Image (tube, helix red, strand yellow):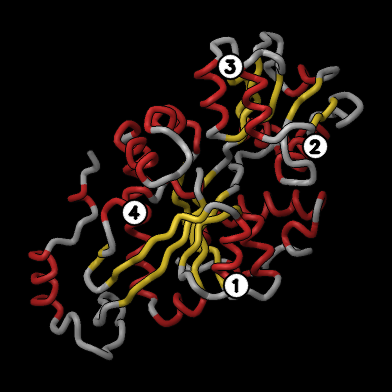
Amino acid sequence: MYAGRLFRVSAVSLLLAAAAGGVLWASGARESAGFVADTVHLRVATLRGPTGMGMVPLLEEGPLVAPGVSVSYEVVGTPEVMVSRILSGDVDFASLPLNLAAKLYNSGVQYQLAAVNVLGVLYLVSDESTVHTLQDLKGKRVYLTGKGANPDFLLRYVLTRAGLTPDTDVQLDFRYDQVELSSLMVAGRIHLALLPEPFVTQVVEKNPNDKVVMRFADAWREALGKDIPLAQGCVVVRAKSAEEHPQAVKSFLAAYKRSVEWVNANHEQAGILIQKHGMGLSAAAAASAISRMSLVYQPATDARVAVEQFLSVLLKFAPQSIGGKLPDSGFYLSN
């Protein structure tokens, strides 16, 4: 089971910290550069699915992430519910799709990008042995979900960069949702689909003829001609929280970074926690899927190039999906 000692702040460590730093719990005290002098409570919400999977060790461990910093967690089922939490100011941190974070910021919502946490969860899956490159898609029909959403825009972009004309050279078919599409792939009735995790794992484990034939993040890099990752998921922080409690915010982000690293290093144990905390996968499926989740922790300033590249593509195809412009420098939380 999860190695809680990596994250738990024991009673002994709290006493040691108090002895070393003076008054640890003094009411009304303020934060200093390296030390939280009062108990700060942070509220964290994460979407069910890949954007939340790197956080499950923290959900398991409980509220205390550092001396004087406690956290409560909520797993949210839909982006719409997440937006309502953010607009009401009910959360200090939220894990959500990157374009949604940009759209909220451009709409005047005072949350900043703290870190990128998912670098691409899309894969081309097929039971055909003839598809290896984008050029091999010419004359074929690719099934995907979300017409007018990110998978649509991203696929059109990489096809165009490869010299192919979407809807002419390659037919894009949006008639099924993700559950239907996955079921039809498993049944062998559809032969080529662009799917996100965790649906990829569900398909390839149930139908041995279906294989991952292309990692979309590789097609993205090829289209760009640059080694820039496909940034898709992120964690945002309420600007007021970052301003008033900078050390507490840093403490949580440090704990979250360790959490992501633990998940990537302990697939089977993490799978158990993913199932336990309702992230949408069984333990076995989650353990298999983690290697394709591209779970990372990249601070906002370090990830800015990848963020702006992703948002620039959306700005071209669907400016409304990011709020009509690239976010300014205030979007990025300083390290």
Residue beneath label 1, please? 87
Looking at marks 3 and 4 on the same chain, the residue that comes earlier in the sequence is marked by: 4
Residue type (three-letter) at the residue carrying disc 4: Leu
Residue beneath label 3, please? 211
Looking at marks 1 and 4 on the same chain, the residue that comes earlier in the sequence is marked by: 4
Verify CB contact (< 8 Å) between mark 2 and mark 1: no
Please identify, in this view, whether the residue under mark 3 or under mark 4 is nearer the observer.
4
Residue beneath label 2, please? 156
Looking at marks 2 and 3 on the same chain, the residue that comes earlier in the sequence is marked by: 2
Residue type (three-letter) at the residue carrying disc 2: Arg
- For disc 2, the neighbor class at 10 Å (few under 14, some 14 to 19, many from 20) is some
- For disc 3, the neighbor class at 10 Å (few under 14, some 14 to 19, many from 20) is many
- For disc 4, the neighbor class at 10 Å (few under 14, some 14 to 19, many from 20) is many
Looking at marks 4 and 2 on the same chain, the residue that comes earlier in the sequence is marked by: 4
Please identify, in this view, whether the residue under mark 2 or under mark 3 is nearer the observer.
3
Q: What is the spatial separation of the Cα atoms under label 4 and label 2, in whole angstroms?
A: 37 Å
Please identify, in this view, whether the residue under mark 4 or under mark 2 is nearer the observer.
4
Verify CB contact (< 8 Å) between mark 3 and mark 4: no
Q: Which mark is residue 59?
A: 4
In the rendered image, the quadrant that contains the N terminus is top left
Verify CB contact (< 8 Å) between mark 2 and mark 3: no
Tell which residue pokes out farthest to the right in this image: 168
Please identify, in this view, whether the residue under mark 1 or under mark 3 is nearer the observer.
1
The percent coordinates of residue 287 (x first, y second) are 39, 30
**Above or below for 274 versus 36:** above
The percent coordinates of residue 142 (x first, y second) are 76, 25
Q: What is the spatial separation of the Cα atoms under label 1 and label 4, in whole angstroms?
A: 23 Å
Helix, strand or loop for disc 3:
strand
Q: Quadrant of residue 163?
A: top right
